[in-house]
Amino acid sequence: MSERSFSTPLIGRDEELLRLGGILERARNGRGQAVLVAGDAGVGKTRLLDEVAGRAAAAGVTVVVGHCVDLGDVGLPYLPFTEILGVLAGDERFSGVLAAHPAVERLLGAASDSARDADARLRLFEGVAGLFAELAAAVPLLLVLEDLHWADQSSRDLLRFLLSRGVLPRRLAVLASYRADDLHRRHPLRPLLAELVRLPGVERLEVRRLADAEVARLVRALEERPLSEARVRDIVERAEGNAFYTEELVAAADTDGMPTGLADLLLIRVEQLSETAQQVLRTAAVAGRRVGHDLLRDAVGLPEEELESALREAVGRQLLVAGDGDTYAFRHALAREAVYGDLLPGQRARLHGRYARLLAARGGGAETAAERAYHYRESHDLPEALTASVQAADHARRVGAPAEELRHLEAALDLWPAVSCETRPAGEGLDPVSLTLRASAAAAHSGDAHRAVSLTRAALAGTGQDADPELAARVRYTLAGNLMTVDNLAAAFAYSSEALAMIPAEPPSRTWVWAAATHVMAARQVGDDDTALRVARQALEVAERIGATAARADLLISLARLEGGGRRTPEGRERLREARELARSAGDTPVEMRALFTLAIGCFEAGELRECLPWITEGLDRARRAGLLSSPYALEMRYLRLLVLFTLGQWDECLRVARADPAPGFAEGAVLYIALARGEPDVVERARALLGEPFDWMGTFVGGIVLTDAAALRGDAEEAVARARDAVAVLSDELGRAPHVTVRLAALALAAVADRAAAERHGGAGTDRWSGVAGELVELARATAAGQGPEGQAWLARAEAEWTRAGSGPSTAAWEKAVAAFTDGDVYEAARVRLRYAEALAADGRRAEAGEQARAVRETAAALGAAPLLERAETLLRRSAPAENPVPPLTAREQDVLRLLALGRSNRQIGEELFITGKTASVHVSNILAKLGAASRTEAVAIAYRERLITPEPTAQG
């Protein structure tokens, strides 16, 4: 089913062919695999894939090809997959398999699922995946996707779904090409590629530029007549390893005055055609990379015989290639771009208009609306472009493509003011405010929360004083809801208050109930629980009276947090389960997801981590079914799932899940926690990236934890305290009060403060400064831990123990309490606290008990792969050896060096004072660290004071 046949020889690709051939062979033997084929424009990706496809087909593999097309800033949802399914549908061998997967008929234009069917997108994705799996079970299957850099977002989402299911179906291979040189920093394909290459079964293949010798071979293979060595060298030099440039230079070798620009080079071959053939090429270029014979015939307006003659000429010169289904395509996209770019503006506009009218006359309906919108807009027929854009948005919504729906709606909104009232489309919801609200919903569904806020603000600006009160209220509470997703809580509360004040509670209306439900959430977020509780109870009664089931569910979720013991209690969870069932019966997936997330986080806060996972699994399943995996509650659940696995100590499983279901930003917080605990070098840079613009509350939350802990681990008390204070200040500003994470941040910063205070106390320096900082931090921890569950109380116990250590030294009682608090919680933090307990026992002279605790820490650290913690545990074990194995005696010279170490001298300064070289001083320092079992100079000094190997220097009296 591969549609092209090249006469160009394939040279210099033995390595790539061998690798791709091996992948196809493994796929035929039952191991599905995918390869992302990268390379510059013209380097030979298409030729390579065509060769692989030809060899695969000869070996009995079914090959189907789908192309992505550049349609400017409009999108044609699922275009490459629609093409692939169209080819399969035309093959009688597969009719039974396609009939068994009716969901895929949506991509062939045969179905009309409701846009409000929350399961439609998942059914579509699972239907396509199931179809490919069943086909591959019957015959080995190769899918080739070309030009991913032009793929619409829905195609990218479907490709992600197909490749991230853990293991590709047996006997299925996927080869997907893209232009590496087209991927600018903000190109939408870049994040997807970063996700895919981390998946099992997905590889990346770089199609390199040809070496000079290979270009020379290609030149001689392309030109039957002998070329002079000078001409060959000239072509080799100018082609720069690009196969397509080489072919064009060879084709232009007979012309006088070689052109300097690639476009000129490409157009030379076009200008060698007859005028009729050039006309056909220009018309085809306006259609895009590919065009059907009948459409091209009608657009060019030539008799059939003249058209066929012109096409034969263009195909013979290898500018066009014939494909399946009576279609023609430019042999290379660069050729099409050059021909299109050479058209005069008037020519382009006329040809675009002709294509738009032809597509409309053919009655293609919603499926061709995106193409019609593109052609109408480029032909400057704005009224028709507006109508087609709305129709394209409707089609995108029906097939579950929110990003494309957003793009078409934004195009319609751009066109709206330029189109007169009498020529605008009419109907319910066809006004700028309603279209903008709809666009904001599409932005939210596609995961672009900040764009959703911007669009809702635009809708608000469009509602004048004479606007319908219900519409004005709906705009405001929608804006409030969107602002909460980007953590602009004070503004959210202000807009929800306005919305509630705009319409009366009586007579009851759904608009008022939803305005009230939104206001309840906003009031709770800013800490006004009294208002939230009062409005929630009133609104719940109205919702029950008028049968507003989804709003009733939403209010029950809020009340589960506001009444009684909250979401951690059995009573709260029972109310949440009721809300989940109500939301499900109403078909409101976002509210159902909110209920499931709240059930999961309630279990987490109660310390019931394993009970948390089933709720997360159910919630993410609902998100997949609705195509809402990038929505706020889905991201929260993805973060929480990884956090639970991290907390339980299942780190490798946590990383596996993160690789299989990559999530953006804060949702991979647990991956950063593991990276820090395992001592990976780039974790600080990755955490800082979460603190950029636009502001993200959870990103700041995660980044604050990682950066504070990282500073504490490297002994930088000033940085640790500054990071904790900054994070608390920013999060408090947005929340209106200190967040729950404050107790954790305070405890982490206190660890660094206690280390610094202990070092200065051993050195004989005053610790007043650090005692004051420690007191401030512990008070912050106490204030925010009040009312928190087991996790918050465990962090408070740790903060209290660190505070005591900072002020007067380690307390075995305080650390024993902290160990008990973490016993059923975070495996890693429990081990870290146990190590502190062991250090306190060692300081009390209870070496055997200290060794027992340190061995337990060592076992946990080794199982987790937490190398820094493991090293500290082993160091303590060496120090806690029985009395019959004391610290090896230090030589007199080592005693002198140790005394100067305690005074903070560098190796060079030690050498100067003892009249030895700095290198000799360094050797003495290394010997001292080894004998004391210390990991650093600071730790060696602390051990020396504890073992009474040195005594503090006397301080001067004023």
Image (cartoon, rainbow, N blue to C red):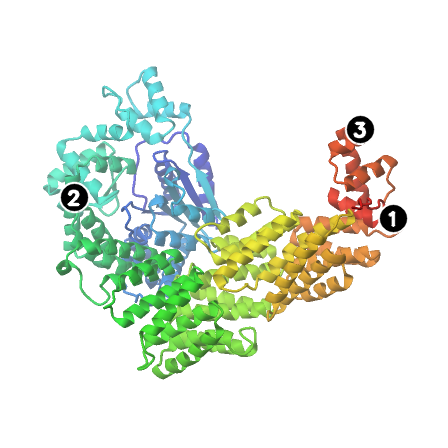
Which of marks 1 and 3 precedes in the sequence? Answer: 1
Q: Which residue occupies 69% across, 51% down?
A: 869
- The percent position of residue 661, horizontal first and vertical second, equals 48, 55
Q: Quadrant of residue 271?
A: top left
* Residue under label 2: 349
Which of marks 2 and 1 precedes in the sequence? Answer: 2
Placement of 720 over or under 784, stated as above or below: above
Q: Which residue occupies 54% across, 75% down?
A: 566
Placement of 414 over or under 743, stated as above or below: above
Residue type at mark 2?
Ala
> Gap in Å between the C-alphas at discs 1 and 2?
91 Å
> Gap in Å between the C-alphas at discs 2 and 3?
86 Å
Q: Quadrant of residue 321?
A: top left
Helix, strand or loop status at disc 2? helix
Q: Is residue 306 left or right of residue 328?
A: left
Q: Is residue 89 visible?
A: yes
Q: Residue furthest bottom?
A: 545
* Residue under label 3: 916
Discs 1, 2 touching: Cβ within 8 Å = no
> Gap in Å between the C-alphas at discs 3 and 1?
31 Å
Between label 3 and label 1, give the one nearer the viewer: 3
Q: Decide: few, some or many residues near mark 2? Use Cα within 10 Å; few <14, some 14-19, many ≥20.
A: some
Placement of 698 over or under 599, stated as above or below: above
* Residue under label 1: 885
- The percent position of residue 496, horizontal first and vertical second, equals 38, 69
